[in-house]
Image: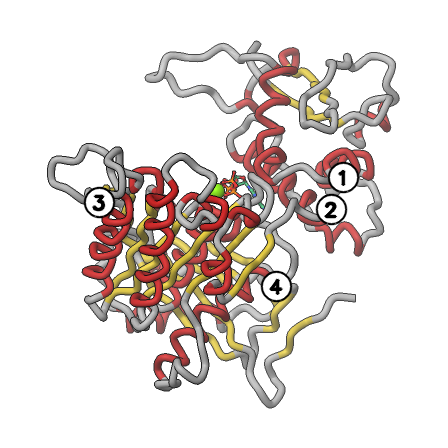
């Protein structure tokens, strides 16, 4: 049975509604909010991850791209009586710019985005983690701001504004940092006029000149300080592969240039201690190699969150989003409705025309074979399956629009199968012969391999 979070009780559930306004809209936020609230009044029980993009009402059609309840960690929400917080935003299309430390330096020390950035949109929803990980990070940042608001004495209660996400490669650490910053820039848009995201290019801070690297780190943080000095801005700083800037100082004695590496770590620690006094900054760091990180840095991280490979449910959700995308792009056709794991459980995984496609990723075989694979490997799989088993469709000149696959003649239909070894390499191709229709319908070959029905021009 699914838990429906009823907001009719004593403490109303806070539900965040994110409203993406069209770039050319001139409507006031007050008007948009009023129309969105009226629109939501017509809806009651919805899933925690719901997005509307089509509207009957003319005002919404003209001014709003989407209305989203983006809270996938909640199952179903009864909107009646909920405390709706409506966030109205537009996306920044400027893309990335670079921050250079010296005017004549070619190597950029950092990449910089204004948030909410068009590039980061949708990352949050695409990431699938164990329950609570995303919410915990949102709550963490809210708490840092809340404690600053309340003037909590940081000599008595310590927080450093540093988050460390660690774990094996390809499981969404960097993406989660970007998504978190994007989400907070939307949710805190009433409080901060704008948000910035600075991704430090750690390697550029290691100078070719001996003993200069520590100074480069200090210069980098001075640049960041300038951004933070604007109290209307919320600033996120990402240090990917933080072990390169914070290598354990005892280990670096063994290197060829020990004092340079030590100077870098010392500078980073000093700068972090200075920066943490500002309420409008969050330092997000990632690492695959926590054992190489200096203990003094580790001690400064308020949250050390391990991000491991997706769970079985996560694998299902990732494959479902892949299937959805392949259908949207008409690589798999016809487009079918996809069911959530909960909906499949409700119908006891019964096979029908409606559930057929959704049952493919939920099969025991697929989840067993995929267990332990990184999110990156899982998301590469449909591409590999196509590259190795469907082969290349005829590529049309760019000016010609490809006809939708659904309109192709039935004779061009092919069925392709792929099997995976534990390293996520696609295996041999199986033909469609020798299969029972039931196996084909379930999307499995004779020996249980993944099968996708595919229409393409060959
Ligand atoms: N948990 C996940 N859910 C959905 N997609 C994921 C997940 N983990 C990884 N991915 C996909 O893999 C891609 C790579 O993720 P990302 O670069 O954030 O991983 P990482 O942990 O930072 O890897 P690395 O340690 O190699 O830097 C993402 O763009 C995303 O599409
Ligand atoms: Mg990364």
Residue at image location 19% in from the left, 32% down from the top? 106
Q: Tell me the distance, in whole angstroms, between the alpha carbons under discs 2 and 4.
A: 16 Å
Mark 3 vs mark 4: give the one in front.
3
Of the two numbered discs 2 and 4 on the same chain, state the one appearing first in sequence. Answer: 4
210 and 377: which is toward the camera: 210
Q: Residues within 10 Å of mark 1 (few under 14, many from 20)?
A: some
Question: Is 443 placed left or right of 293 in the picture?
Answer: right
Question: Is 115 placed left or right of 342 in the picture?
Answer: left
Tags 2 and 1 touching, CB below 8 Å = yes
Of the two numbered discs 1 and 4 on the same chain, state the one appearing first in sequence. Answer: 4
Disc 4 within 8 angstroms of ligand 1 (CB) = no
Q: Which element is circle 3 on?
A: strand
Residue 274 coordinates in the image, percent (x, y): 30, 67
Of the two numbered discs 2 and 3 on the same chain, state the one appearing first in sequence. Answer: 3
Where is 309 relative to 440, above or below? below
Q: Which element is circle 4 on?
A: loop
Q: Quadrant of residue 90?
A: bottom left
* Residue denoted by label 3: 99
* Residue denoted by label 1: 367
């Amino acid at each position: 049975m699914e838990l429906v979070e009823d907001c009719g009780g004593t403490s109303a559930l806070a539900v965040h509604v994110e409203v993406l306004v069209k770039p050319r809209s001139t409507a006031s936020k007050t008007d948009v909010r009023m129309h969105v609230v009226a629109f939501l009044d017509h809806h009651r029980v919805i899933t925690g991850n719901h997005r509307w993009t089509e509207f009957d009402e003319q005002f919404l059609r003209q001014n709003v791209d989407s209305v989203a309840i983006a809270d996938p960690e909640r199952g179903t929400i009864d909107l009646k009586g909920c405390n709706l917080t409506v966030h109205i935003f537009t996306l920044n299309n400027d893309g990335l710019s670079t921050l250079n430390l010296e005017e004549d330096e070619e190597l950029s020390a950092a990449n910089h985005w204004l948030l909410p950035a068009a590039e980061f949109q949708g990352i949050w929803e695409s990431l699938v983690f164990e329950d609570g990980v995303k919410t915990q990070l949102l709550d963490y940042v809210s708490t840092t701001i809340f404690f600053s608001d309340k003037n909590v004495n940081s000599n008595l209660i310590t927080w450093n504004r540093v988050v460390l996400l660690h774990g094996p490669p390809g499981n969404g650490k960097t993406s989660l940092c970007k998504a978190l910053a994007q989400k907070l820039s939307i949710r805190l848009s009433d409080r901060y006029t704008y948000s910035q995201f600075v991704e430090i290019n750690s390697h550029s801070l290691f100078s070719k000149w001996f003993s200069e690297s520590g100074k480069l780190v200090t210069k980098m943080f001075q640049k960041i300080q300038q951004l933070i000095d604007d109290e209307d801005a919320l600033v996120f700083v990402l240090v990917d592969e933080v072990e390169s800037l914070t290598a354990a100082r005892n280990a670096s004695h063994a290197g060829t240039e020990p004092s340079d590496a030590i100077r870098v770590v010392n500078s980073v620690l000093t700068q972090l201690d200075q920066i943490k006094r500002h309420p409008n900054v969050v330092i997000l760091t990632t690492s695959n190699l926590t054992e190489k990180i200096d203990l003094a840095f580790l001690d400064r991280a308020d949250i050390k969150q391990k991000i491991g490979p997706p769970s079985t449910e996560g694998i299902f959700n990732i494959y479902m989003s892949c299937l959805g995308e392949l259908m949207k792009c008409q690589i798999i056709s016809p487009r079918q409705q996809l069911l959530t794991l909960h909906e499949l459980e409700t119908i006891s995984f019964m096979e029908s025309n409606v559930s057929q496609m959704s049952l493919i990723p939920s099969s025991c075989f697929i989840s067993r074979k995929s267990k332990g694979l990184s999110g990156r490997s899982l998301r590469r799989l449909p591409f590999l399956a196509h590259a190795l088993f469907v082969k290349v469709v005829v590529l049309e000149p760019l000016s010609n629009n490809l006809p939708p696959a659904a309109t192709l003649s039935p004779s061009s239909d092919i069925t392709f199968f792929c099997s995976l070894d534990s390293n996520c390499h696609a295996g041999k191709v199986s033909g469609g012969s020798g299969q029972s229709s039931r196996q084909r319908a379930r999307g499995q070959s004779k020996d249980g391999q993944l099968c996708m029905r595919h229409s393409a021009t060959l």
